[in-house]
Image (cartoon, rainbow, N blue to C red):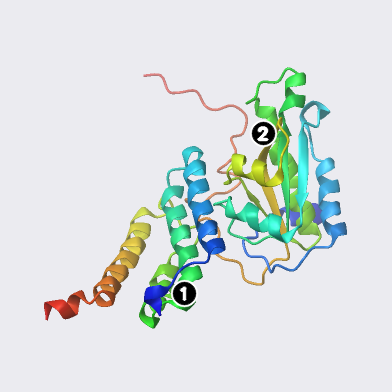
Amino acid sequence: MTNPVLEAIRTRRMARALTGEPLARAELEAVLKAARAAPSAGNRRLHRFIAVQAPLTLKLLRMVSPGMFQRPSAIVVICIDRAKAESFGMRPNAKGLFVDVGTAAQTMLLAAHSLGLGAGVVTSFSQAAVSAVLNVPEGLSPEMFVCLGRPAPTQPPGMPTRGRVTWESLTQWERFPSAPHV
Amino acid sequence: MAGKMVLSEDEALELVAFLITAARTQVDEAAEYGSMRLLTAAGRLAELIAERVSPETRTFLTGPLRQIPDLAVHTADPARYVAALDGVCRALGEHLVTHFGLDRKES
């Protein structure tokens, strides 16, 4: 069974080598528009996106992001709006806050892929340093970068697999079997 | 002359920023990232100085040091990862002996 959406999901890869060619503003806006359509717990929309295209800002963000191997032409910083979350009575580490970071990121990755862009996520950065670089207001916490650009023709090897992983190996149908009685 | 080689302030700051922020992110991340970050830092320093060093050092920086992929981690294949790191360390040791003339002082 296949269709264009399944094919896009199947062929998407983390892009860790980008050409440095600038993105059109319209391309970045299309990715951000897709993020607006991502699932959000309770439709509360507790996230904010910071879109960065200025070369010097991109350079400084890379300096404080040890996990950023690529040199992106644009970055979307996904932030949690902590003040707004608190207004809903949510704890700071409520899982829904972080789940929604993931749904927004995956939606942007697929949107970028559909536009022929290279995209990859980065969480290995100093939140304090990123907040200083971007002058992030109190109450917003930067949680994840979606790095965007034109994919280089050759990509470096990705993270190695640890054994063979299939959808079957990741799936348990129905209930887990009971432990044998001894 | 390699002996007078210095990084520019911008280059040095980039490396300092990487090391400081890596120290912070490592607190929250998988232990296996520790080696990876150190190798990334070594690789970035190598990129910054490669054009300013002696041909022999450049050969090490662009050869053995680049043999380990950027995203290699030890859990995928511990024996192979350690062997690869030992290979780099061995090449480094051999280069240090030659570069600092230890072999010449002994003869």
Number of other residues with Cα within 10 Å of mark 2, as a class: few under 14, some 14 to 19, many 20 or more: some
Instruction: Point out which mark residue A98 bears.
Output: 2
Q: Is residue A62 left or right of residue A52?
A: left
Q: Residue at x 12, y 77 (%)?
A: B106
Residue A131, picture quadrant: top right
Residue A49: horizontal and vertical position, in percent? 77, 42
Going by the numbered disc 2, the residue's amino acid type is Phe
Report the number of discs: 2
Residue A13 can be seen, yes or no: no
| Image quadrant in which the C terminus of chain A is located | top left
Residue B15: horizontal and vertical position, in percent? 50, 58
Residue A151, picture quadrant: bottom right
Q: Residue at x 62, y 29 (%)?
A: A174
Seen from the viewer's position, the closer of residues B1 and B27 is B1
Residue A86 can be seen, yes or no: yes
- Outermost residue, right direction? A26
Seen from the viewer's position, the closer of residues A167 and A153 is A153
Determine the CA span between mark 2 and mark 1. 41 Å
Going by the numbered disc 1, the residue's amino acid type is Ala
State the SS at label 2: helix
Residue A19 position (above or below residue A170): below
Number of other residues with Cα within 10 Å of mark 1, as a class: few under 14, some 14 to 19, many 20 or more: some
Instruction: Point out which mark residue B50 bears.
Output: 1
Q: Is residue B51 left or right of residue A80?
A: left
Instruction: Point out which mark residue B13 bears.
Output: none
State the SS at label 1: helix
